[in-house]
Image: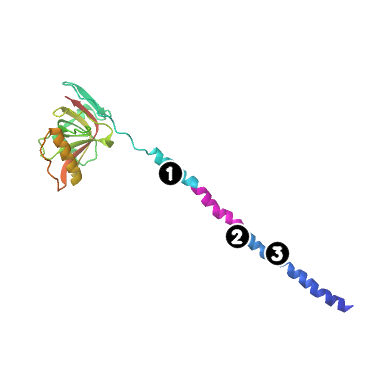
Amino acid sequence: MRFPNLILLPGLLLVLAQGCPAPASAPQDGPSETQPSETQPSETQPSETQPSASGEEAAAPQERPEVPPDLEDGETGHYGADFALDDADRVDISAALESCTGTGELCRVEARIASVCQNRGCWFTIESDATEDTIRVRMHDYGFFVPMNTGGADVELEGRLERRLVPVDEVQHYAEDEARAAGEDAEIPEITEPEYTWEFMATAVRITR
């Protein structure tokens, strides 16, 4: 009777041994469950690039403003935004060179136009007895231009004034524009050095011709 038990014992051990791989398969299932989570970020990447693509489309360059028509004698034209400062806050450009330069504060000045860009009216220079250096007026963000026939006209402008070192290529460009404004046929000298200049970044301009 003892021999049959001994014969059944190896069979029982074999059955138990076959049941061991089941727990070992559990760790294999674990990594397979985490694999989809690793691929999920890659699936969301296209959605992350879509806003940037739409943002680039929204940042399309703004068209340049048109050149305003010439002013008639005695005519007044207003360009850009409305004046933010009161009439009582107006100062002469010579006084503004001392009180407004480099402060970052808005100032409203009166002056006389010396010359105007003859390409599109995108800048002009103004005169002052306080300095021999050029005082150049540019329009904020190129948001507006002025009539090209307003050289010698009275101007009232509002913006910010600063002292700036202008690079050689920009000085050369302005020299060419100024020669056209003056109607000069002489050869324009080659600019080799940067120049310090006064620069007025205007947000509002009123010109009386």
Name the residue rendered at 74%, 68% in the picture.
18
Please state the horizontal and vertical placement of residue 13, each as a whole percent of the image. 77, 72
Mark nearer the N terminus (2 vs 1): 2
Q: Which residue is mark 2?
A: 31
- Which residue is at the front of the view, 165 or 118? 118
Q: CA distance from mark 2 to mark 1?
A: 34 Å
Residue 74: horizontal and vertical position, in percent?
Answer: 16, 20
The segment highlighted magenta reads 32-45
Q: Disc 1 marks which residue?
A: 52
Q: Residues within 10 Å of mark 3 (few under 14, many from 20)?
A: few
| Inter-mark Cα distance, 2 to 3 | 16 Å
For label 1, the SS is helix
Residue at horizontal 19 percent and vertical 26 percent from the top: 207
- Callout 2: 10 Å neighbours few (<14), some, many (20+)? few
| Front residue of 129 and 67 | 67
Q: Amino acid at mark 3?
A: Ala
Q: Which mark is residue 22?
A: 3
Q: Position of residue 20 (x, y in %)?
A: 71, 68
Q: Is residue 29 left or right of residue 118?
A: right
Instruction: Determine whether label 2 and label 3 are within 8 Å by CB.
Output: no
- Secondary structure beneath label 3: helix
The residue nearer to you, when weighing 140 against 162, is: 140
* Picture quadrant where residue 21 is located: bottom right
Residue type pointed to by label 1: Ser
SS for callout 2: helix
